[in-house]
Amino acid sequence: MADLQFPSLDLKTEFIEIKGEQVLVVSFVGQITNTNAYEINRNISVIFRDSVYNIILDLTKLDYINSIGVATLIGIIKTVESHHGKILIGGLNHFLENVIRLMDLPRKVQIFNTKQEAITNWEP
């Protein structure tokens, strides 16, 4: 899977196998701001081109997210849900934890402090 680069943000992707399931880890590195949010939102669907809908969002290195970025995360979650996949979020700093908690995510979306915790707690 190819990585994506935007101004101020890199999306790094890797497939891993957890308990017999193929899972796509999407790592956000940088910031989602007014300068890159629309481009990210227009191009984010490329992460689904391999039809893998089991996803861990690694936000460990996401320094900032604006409202369009929040909408992008919600769009990813809704796409995963519509394909009966599973999504976990890991790696929240204090700022992101507050933002994510305010999002009123579906109950199925579990949030962990680290990417490794999300991997460890993955249930098929």
Image (spheres, rainbow, N blue to C red):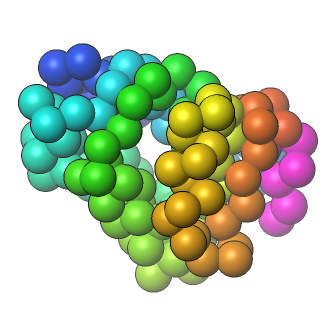
| Nearest to the observer: residue 22 or residue 110 | 110
122 in the magenta segment: yes
Q: Position of residue 24 (x, y in %)?
A: 56, 44
Magenta stretch: give its range.
Answer: 118-124
Q: Specify whether 12 is left or right of 102.
A: left
Instruction: Give the quadrant of residue 76.
Output: bottom left
Name the residue: 84% across, 38% down: 117
Name the residue: 31% across, 60% down: 71
Classify 45 as above or below 65: below
| Nearest to the observer: residue 30 or residue 5 | 30
User: In the rendered view of the protein, which quadrant contains the C terminus?
Assistant: bottom right
Q: Position of residue 86 (x, y in %)?
A: 64, 66
Name the residue: 24% across, 18% down: 8
User: In the rendered view of the protein, which quadrant contains the N terminus?
Assistant: top left
Residue 3 in view, yes or no: no
| Nearest to the observer: residue 77 or residue 99 | 99
25 in the magenta segment: no
Q: Position of residue 37 (x, y in %)?
A: 18, 41
Q: Specify whether 105 is left or right of 5.
A: right
Classify 115 as above or below 98: above
| Nearest to the observer: residue 85 or residue 87 | 87
Residue 33 in view, yes or no: yes
Q: How many marks?
A: 0
Name the residue: 47% across, 27% down: 62
Q: Position of residue 118 (x, y in %)?
A: 78, 44
Classify 12 as above or below 79: above
Q: Specify whether 50 is left or right of 46.
A: right
